[in-house]
Image (cartoon, rainbow, N blue to C red):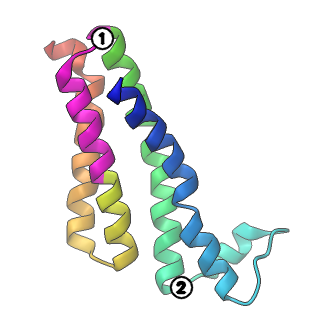
Amino acid sequence: MLIYACLLFAALMLVLTKAPVAWAQQRTGRYDNHDPRAQQRELTGFGARALAAHQNSNEAFPLFAAGVLVSVIVAPGAPIATTLAVIFVLARLGYWGCYLANIALLRSLLWGVGYLVSLALIAMPLWM
């Protein structure tokens, strides 16, 4: 059951990671809801990092979701799959925090952890 909670939380992160972007946009004096992407392209510093972290969350989710689905089909209830899903969520939270705080090396390492976890979940039929 925890693996499904991780999948749900990862999906919710797609919206949660948008909050700092919207905050940064608002700090420019307005939130341009008519053309928010044009406004986002003008962000610098924290706002630009928040946007990059948000975009990367959108990019990382499909691979993780595919991995979770493969793992529950191939090995339903496998403790290793749940452990990997939890590691993914923790890595992504750390990645997001590092991106916002401008901690580049740790951010990149955490990205790698999340990516490898997703690949491991997808590859479960090969090693289970």
Image height of 36 relative to 79, above or below? below
Residue appearing at x 21%, y 48% in the figure = 113
Q: Amino acid at mark 1?
A: Pro
Residue appearing at x 28%, y 54% in the figure = 111
**What label sits on residue 4 in the rendered view?**
none
Q: Amino acid at mark 2?
A: Thr
Main SS, magenta region, reads helix
Helix, strand, or loop for circle 2?
loop
Q: Residues within 10 Å of mark 2 (few under 14, many from 20)?
A: few
Q: Quadrant of the N terminus?
A: top left
Image height of 108 relative to 38, above or below? above
Q: In the depicted view, which residue is nearer to us: 18 or 108?
A: 18
Q: Quadrant of the C terminus?
A: top left
Q: Residue furthest right?
A: 34
Look at the image and tell me whether residue 94 can be seen: yes
Q: Which residues are magenta?
A: 74-91
Residue 110 covered by magenta stretch: no
**What label sits on residue 44 in the rendered view?**
2
Q: Residue 30: which quarter of the image?
A: bottom right
Callout 1 touching callout 2 (CB < 8 Å): no
Which residue carries the number 1 mark? 76
Q: Residue furthest front?
A: 1
Helix, strand, or loop for circle 1?
loop
Q: In the depicted view, which residue is nearer to us: 61 or 83?
A: 83
